[in-house]
Image (cartoon, rainbow, N blue to C red):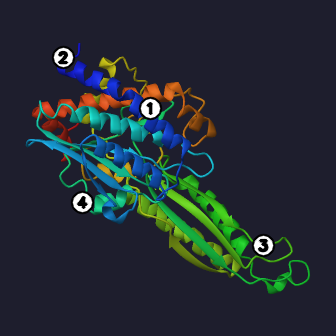
Amino acid sequence: MLDPQKQALIQEVDRLSPELSQISRFLHAHPELAFEEHQAAELLTRTMEEHGFSVERGVAGLPTAFTASYASGEGPTIAFLAEYDALPGIGHACGHNLIASGSVGAALALKAFLGEVPGRVLLVGCPAEEKGGGKIPLVESKVFRKVDVAMLVHPSNRTEIVKKALGMRDVQVEFFGKAAHAAATPHLGINALDAVILTFNNINALRQQIRPDARIHGIITNGGKAPNIIPDHAVALFYVRALDMEYLEDLYQKVLGCFEAAAMATGARYQVKRAGNDYHPHRVNYTLGHIFRQNLEALGGVVDQGPEAAELGSTDVGNVSQVVPTLQPTITICGPKVSCHMAEFAVASASDAGEEGMFMAARAMALTGLDLLRDRDALHRVKKEFTGGRRP
């Protein structure tokens, strides 16, 4: 049974639900790519200002990043992370419209109770989760320096409290060869595309000897101009992933060896370029997850937790989790045959089930924030685990 204060907090989320729905639907109807989320940032910052939050725009030198803060008395800072970038061609097929509106709902609802419990609520506007790692500059610019706990809830086809994430490094390789007529004088050419193909073959051979939690995958972004011209330029982009940064670095060096071997075999020259910032693995906080789970189940949520190492992706939330206790559970908005980055998931993100999942997430996050503000022992246990204490 939830106590009267928690019941009132749920009612506050419900009161806000029409506004949260409008936010979600606007973001879904106006998808913006990484670092281009100008309409989203404007809507969210204006909303927070209208509710009395102090807003700082352009945080960490990112035009579409922001913070919105509201404090009452001396107490812990609870941060909610809002993501709002979309995917090329398929819009909000990762449900970031729901993440943003859910975090806004939790922040606004909890703010209404800061007169009863001292503390600070912080909404962090996080651009470019899908590409570029917008949270990484936020971490580096110390946005989370005075934050006690950070959280967001990601829509999914399962409701899971503990969700690990792989560290990830982007790497682009360019091969430079020599053009020649592919029929008349092929012997005069150096085939850059062959170097790319050999790179894929080398990596495919490497996969047999890598850990089962690691991933290497890539695409060819430039493979030549015409079949009758030996390609003098070819480009591939790869993602290298692992559950810890030490092994990620080791695997990355092996991938570089695959590039070098392909260049040696073909005579092509090659150049490596890092395509973005490293996404770090998600540092799970089981104590924080337990508090959230209790609140979610008290709301009637059903957890269908799978294996922690199943269906692993990567997120720049992992970088946040390295500097502050961080929670990123998932909540069900669709059936098991639909998953993130599918066009069908974009449809689910604008559905009634998607919105109900977002409302549930906002309620559970707000309740978890309230627990941490009024129960300093609980917050201490969360921090103790983060600093090296034993997990429960």
In the depicted structure, whether residue 91 falls above or below residue 133: above
Quarter occupied by residue 339: top right
Q: Residue at x 67, y 68 (%)?
A: 196
CA gap, disc 4 to disc 1?
32 Å
Residue identified by numbered label 2: 4
Q: Is residue 92 left or right of residue 191?
A: left
Confirm whether residue 315 shows in the render.
no
Query: In terms of depth relative to the viewer, which is nearer, 54 or 322?
Result: 54
Q: Residue at x 64, y 66 (%)?
A: 199
What amino acid is at disc 2? Pro
Q: Earlier in the sequence, mark 1 or mark 2?
A: 2
Q: Earlier in the sequence, mark 3 or mark 1?
A: 1
CA gap, disc 2 to disc 4?
36 Å
Residue identified by numbered label 3: 225
Residue identified by numbered label 1: 21
Pointer 1 with pointer 2, Cβ within 8 A:
no
Q: Is residue 184 left or right of residue 311?
A: right
Q: Residue at x 46, y 42 (%)?
A: 96
Residue identified by numbered label 4: 142
Viewer-nearest of discs 3 and 4: 4
